[in-house]
């Protein structure tokens, strides 16, 4: 099975090299030249705004918000009367609440 796959890969590779061999080499050369010369190009657009390297540049103020400010302790407390707790949250018998 592996010999058959190797033969197919070799056949396809030789056909592809024959068809694309010259075109691929030319394309690779142009791409390499473009990448090499692209690093030497001068930026066309100047920086907008203050220079980031200037220590005297004006910047926006920094604000502070505590991440713990709304914290309330939820430590367990002593158990309270469960009947009173249930009566506080149940609807009154006179309410017009329908099921």
Image (spheres, rainbow, N blue to C red):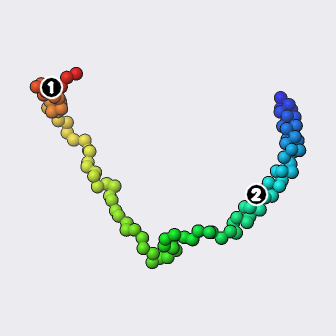
Nearest the viewer among 60 and 43 is: 43
Side of 22 relative to 78 (left or right):
right
Viewer-proximal residue among 31 and 90: 31
The answer to whether residue 63 shows anywhere in this view is yes
User: How far across and down, in percent of the image, does residue 74 sit?
Assistant: 26, 45
- 26 vs 62, left or right, is right
Few, some or many C-alpha atoms within 10 Å of disc 2 (few <14, some 14-19, many ≥20)?
A: few
Q: Position of residue 53 (x, y in %)?
A: 52, 74
Q: How dense is the environment of label 1, judged by Cα within 10 Å: few (below 14), some, or many (20 and up)?
A: few
Residue sitting at x 47%, y 76%: 55
Task: Say which element carries label 2.
Answer: helix
**Image quadrant in which you'd find residue 87:** top left
Dot 2 corresponds to which residue?
31
Image coordinates for residue 89, horizontal then vertical, percent: 18, 32
Q: Is residue 21 left or right of residue 48?
A: right
Query: What number is the disc on residue 96?
Result: 1
Residue drawn at (17%, 29%), measured in percent from left and top? 90
The residue lying at 70 percent from left, 69 percent from top is 40
Mark 2 or mark 1, earlier in chain: 2
Residue at 29 percent of width and 55 percent of height = 69
Residue 83: tell me if it is visible. no
């Amino acid at each position: 099975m592996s010999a058959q796959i190797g033969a197919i890969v070799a056949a396809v590779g030789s056909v592809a090299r024959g068809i694309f061999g010259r075109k691929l080499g030319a394309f690779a050369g142009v791409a390499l030249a473009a990448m090499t010369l692209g690093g030497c190009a001068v930026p066309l657009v100047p920086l907008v705004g203050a220079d980031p390297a200037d220590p005297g540049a004006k910047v926006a103020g920094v604000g502070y918000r505590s991440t713990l400010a709304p914290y309330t302790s939820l430590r367990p407390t002593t158990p309270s009367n469960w009947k009173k707790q249930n009566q506080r949250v149940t609807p009154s018998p006179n309410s017009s609440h329908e099921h």
